[in-house]
Image (cartoon, rainbow, N blue to C red):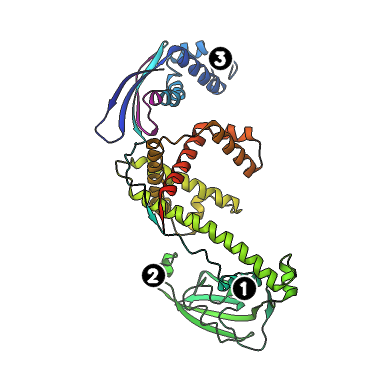
Amino acid sequence: MALKDFIKKEAANTYELVVSVDGTIFGKAINKVYKKQVKSINIPGFRKGKAPRHIIERMYGKEVFYDDAMQECYPDALYEASQEKGLEIVAVESLEAVEAGADGFTFKASIIVKPELEVDGYEGIEVTKPSTEVTEELIDKEIESVRDRNSRMVTVEDRAAEMGDTTVIDFEGFVDGVAFEGGKSENFSLALGSGNFIPGFEEQIVGHNAGEEFTITVTFPEDYQAEELKGKEAEFKIVLHEIKTKELPEVDDEFVKDVSEKETVAEYREELRETIAKRLADEAEKDIDNQISEKLVELAQGDIPEAMYERQVDEMIRDFEARLRSQGLNVGLNEYLQYMGMDMDSLRNVYRADAEKIVKRKLVLEAIAKKENIEVTEEDIEKEYADIAEMYKIEVAQVKAAIPAETIKGDLAVRKALEFVKDKAVIK
């Protein structure tokens, strides 16, 4: 590979490269393409997939594999050319072959590269540390949370439904006297006050007793996902089968023994005090990091390619799709979006603002790392590989195969830069 020409274009962070790929590399790529494609090529006199390369080239022309072979060569050739100039490509706007032959080929590429920001004002950033005081109220709240997790549902027979109860109901909805799709269910468990149903639905169940049959009237919101129901008044026929409420355990020594390794309420409260103190300290550090990150984003001045934001959105959507799969949802992303009344454009808009912040923050921290000569050692990199391997319970070699050392190095530099800024911050 040889970089023949390098031109800065008028658009920010955009360059035009003219790159040549020698005959040896091109020849290997052609042979690779031939081996892939020969399996589907029929040549008279040869079994399918067995025709020699020179026979295929004689019949279809020597350039028959050129286009696909060039596609094989582009990524490495562009990477080497950009490395030669110390640039990181974030997007390729266009690729155009200039000439090709047995001795290699030349192509022209228009690329967008990652910018290097000039950054100042990152020393002495003022942030406010959240309170880490462990109050009795916080301990009480934690105990209530544990009581709730250890509660049981009991049937209510001596009173009407109240907010906070869970009711078991049959319901069927009608608009203008006609039942609508998705408006019917039997033995449905509905927590009153959850806000899961149309506004006014849950409130109108309050006051009714188990065994009652009654009708309620609600109006669908104007922004309801089903177009045909937006703003419509609906009547629901309800059968209230059962009312349930949570029964919470008493907070005594027996309760403590059931939920912890402590013996008394006093010992348990002290244990919770220590647990909450650690949690508050961790949350405070994260809050400080977030405050610093928000202020660093404001320091990002310069032309940042739109392609970087779009690439970050792509990554966030891939992560979202992976989370859906991990939760056992057996539907594709497009089906899920359709069910939620969204499309891909609206999902991208959801992630857009956060994507911009992530990109700006990273660029600023990379600029700080460079300006402050922050060093990432081989020992740092090896430790990070080991930590990742430990986290996912896999071999270090597997991590190294999946994540290039340069990626690890870049991530560590950003992390160290944030610590540098944090050490210089004014924390009130």
Residue 270 point in image, percent of width and height: 65, 68
Q: Which residue is tagged 2?
A: 222
In the displayed structure, 132 sits above or below 63; it is below
Depth order, front residue of 318/225: 318
Occupied quadrant, residue 102: top left
Segment colored magenta: 81-100
Residue 112 position, x and y percent, is: 34, 34
Residues tagged 3 and 2 counted as in contact (Cβ below 8 A): no
- Which residue is under mark 1? 144
Magenta run includes residue 96: yes
Residue under the image location 49 percent in, 51 percent down: 334
Instruction: Indicate the quadrant containing the C terminus: top left, top right, bottom left or bottom right.
Output: bottom left
Between discs 2 and 1, the one toward the N terminus: 1
Query: Which residue, as the protein is rendered here, is positioned at the far bottom?
Result: 158
C-alpha separation, residue under disc 3 versus residue under disc 2: 66 Å
Checking the image for residue 51, the label placed there is 3
How far is mark 3 from mark 1, CA to CA? Answer: 76 Å
